[in-house]
């Protein structure tokens, strides 16, 4: 097991915790196989007499249920997380983990496209317009768009009066 990762005996596949390496706050991400399912960490900005550790459980997309809580110690937070996970795991839909993985792959593909300096099709401006007559035309081609502009102007004139 790599440094910074600790296996937790919470079922098969096992949950592992990985340090978030945050110099300002002690916290860990919790993974079930390769899916990040929650966090356990010191709470920031709470009074000294309040619970110092917080945990949250849930992932998106694929799982609509979320659970969270706070505890005085790390060990208690871990125990509470374990109990919530044991209760929630049987209720997770069969395809939830695969849906999460597909979403991660899609996001990685988008990051790779942007890293290459390319744009997604949805980020590319389009000069296509839909005419009131129902046809689609390219507004940057005057010969193609002239008749359609007349249709649009006529419709605008009717609605203005």
Image (tube, rainbow, N blue to C red):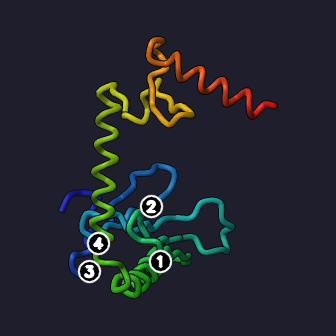
Q: For the residues marked 2 and 3, what is the alpha-carbon distance in whole angstroms?
A: 19 Å
Q: For the residues marked 1 and 4, what is the alpha-carbon distance in whole angstroms?
A: 28 Å
Nearest to viewer (mark 3 / mark 4): 4
Residue 132 is situated, as x and y percent measured from the top left of the image, at: 57, 34
Please state which of residues 40 and 3 is positioned toward the viewer in this rendering. Answer: 40
For the residue labelled by badge 1, is the local secondary structure a helix, a strand or a loop? Answer: helix
- Pointer 2 local density, CA inside 10 Å: few below 14, some 14–19, many at least 20: many
Quadrant in the picture for the N terminus: bottom left
Please identify the quarter of the rendering in which residue 159 is found.
top right
Residue 98 in sight here: yes
For the residue labelled by badge 2, is the local secondary structure a helix, a strand or a loop? Answer: strand
Nearest to viewer (mark 1 / mark 4): 4
Quadrant in the picture for the C terminus: top right
Q: Which mark is residue 95?
A: 4
97 up-or-down from 117: above or below: below
Q: For the residues marked 3 and 1, what is the alpha-carbon distance in whole angstroms?
A: 15 Å
Dots 1, 4 in contact, CB < 8 A: no
Provide the residue designation for mark 2. 27
Provide the residue designation for mark 1. 77
Please state which of residues 122 and 96 is positioned toward the viewer in this rendering. Answer: 122
For the residue labelled by badge 4, is the local secondary structure a helix, a strand or a loop? Answer: loop
Can you name the residue that lies furthest to the right here? 161
Provide the residue designation for mark 3. 9
Q: For the residues marked 2 and 4, what is the alpha-carbon distance in whole angstroms?
A: 29 Å
For the residue labelled by badge 3, is the local secondary structure a helix, a strand or a loop? Answer: loop
Dots 2, 1 in contact, CB < 8 A: no
Please state which of residues 45 and 145 is positioned toward the viewer in this rendering. Answer: 145
Q: For the residues marked 3 and 4, what is the alpha-carbon distance in whole angstroms?
A: 23 Å
């Amino acid at each position: 097991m790599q440094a910074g990762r600790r296996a937790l005996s919470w079922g098969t596949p096992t949950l592992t915790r990985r340090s978030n390496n945050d110099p300002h706050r002690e916290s860990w991400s919790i993974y079930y196989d390769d899916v990040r399912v929650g966090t356990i960490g010191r709470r920031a900005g709470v009074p000294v007499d309040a619970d110092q550790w917080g945990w949250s459980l849930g992932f998106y997309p694929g799982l609509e249920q979320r659970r969270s809580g706070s505890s005085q110690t790390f060990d208690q937070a871990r125990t509470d997380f374990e109990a919530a996970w044991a209760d929630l795991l049987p209720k997770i839909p069969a395809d939830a983990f695969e849906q999460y993985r597909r979403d991660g792959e899609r996001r990685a593909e988008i990051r790779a496209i942007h890293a290459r300096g390319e744009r997604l099709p949805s980020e590319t401006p389009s000069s296509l317009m839909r005419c009131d007559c129902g046809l689609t035309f390219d507004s940057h081609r005057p010969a193609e768009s002239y008749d359609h502009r007349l249709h649009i102007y006529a419709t605008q004139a009717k609605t203005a009066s």
